[in-house]
Image (cartoon, rainbow, N blue to C red):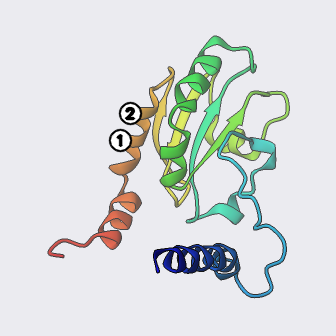
Amino acid sequence: MKAMQLIARRSFLAVLALAIPALTLPAGADEAPAVVPAFGPVPASEVVEADLLFLRRPVIVFADSPNDPAFVRQMELLKRYYAELDARDVILITDTDPATASSLRQKLRPRGFSLVLMDKDWKPMIRKPLPWDGREIVNSIEKMPIARSESLEKSPAGR
């Protein structure tokens, strides 16, 4: 009797193991799901403000050269916080070529190294002349008006 139960249990588990992958894929999905690109810096020349307005929160790092020690330090400080920045809808934009003035460089007019935090309406909220720790950037983002209203929408008071 126990042998029959063991065989039945193994058969059930084998059928279940075959059925689970079929249950997890949506109908007609034969190929693998699209890979979401990893969070990382985007050159200012590739950014179109109109496409990202009210969708992404820009954090822009300007420098006169990609070898500027302040720029290198800032990018190191941000690297540990990529997941937290991504969760807050940040787009990390870099501009290290003043010779080809991007629209952001023309609009914000940085001198040398500069870190600019903008809200989702693409208005500058904070400017820093020195590298800033990622934790401080995340905390500053959470204090921005649009970020506060987003957090209230996610978890309204009294619930």
Which residue is rendered at x = 56% and y = 55% of the image? 122
Q: Is residue 46 above or below residue 41?
A: below
- Horizontal side of residue 92 vs 158, given as left or right: right
Give the answer, above or below, for where 2 lies relative to 105. below
Circles 1 and 2: CB atoms closer than 8 Å: yes
What residue is rendered at 58% in x and 17% in y? 73
Q: How crowded is the residue under tag 2: few (<14 C-alpha within 10 Å), some, or many (20+)?
A: few
How many numbered marks are there? 2
Q: On screen, 87 above or below 66? A: below
Give the residue at x 72% y 21%: 64
Q: Position of residue 49 (x, y in %)?
A: 69, 58
Considering depth in this image, is 124 or 60 the residue closer to the camera?
Answer: 60
- Dividing the picture into quarters, in which one does residue 44 lie? top right
Q: Is residue 98 left or right of residue 60?
A: right
Query: Label 1, on which residue?
Result: 139
* Residue 116 locus on image (x, y percent): 54, 37
Q: Quarter of the image holding residue 15?
A: bottom right
Considering every residue shown, the one lying at the far left of the view is 158
Tell me the amino acid under the disc marked 1: Asn
Give me the disc on residue 36. Answer: none
| Disc 2 secondary structure class | helix
Q: Vertically, is 42 above or below 70?
A: below
Q: Amino acid at mark 2?
A: Glu
60 or 30: which is nearer to us? 30
Image coordinates for residue 141, horizontal then vertical, percent: 41, 47
The residue lying toward the viewer, choosing from 8 and 64, is 8
Q: Residue furthest front?
A: 1
Query: Around disc 1, counting alpha carbons within 10 Å, would you say few (fewer than 14), some (14 to 19), or many (20 or more)?
Result: few
Give the labeled residue for mark 2: 136
The residue positioned 61% from the left and 26% from the top of the image is 75
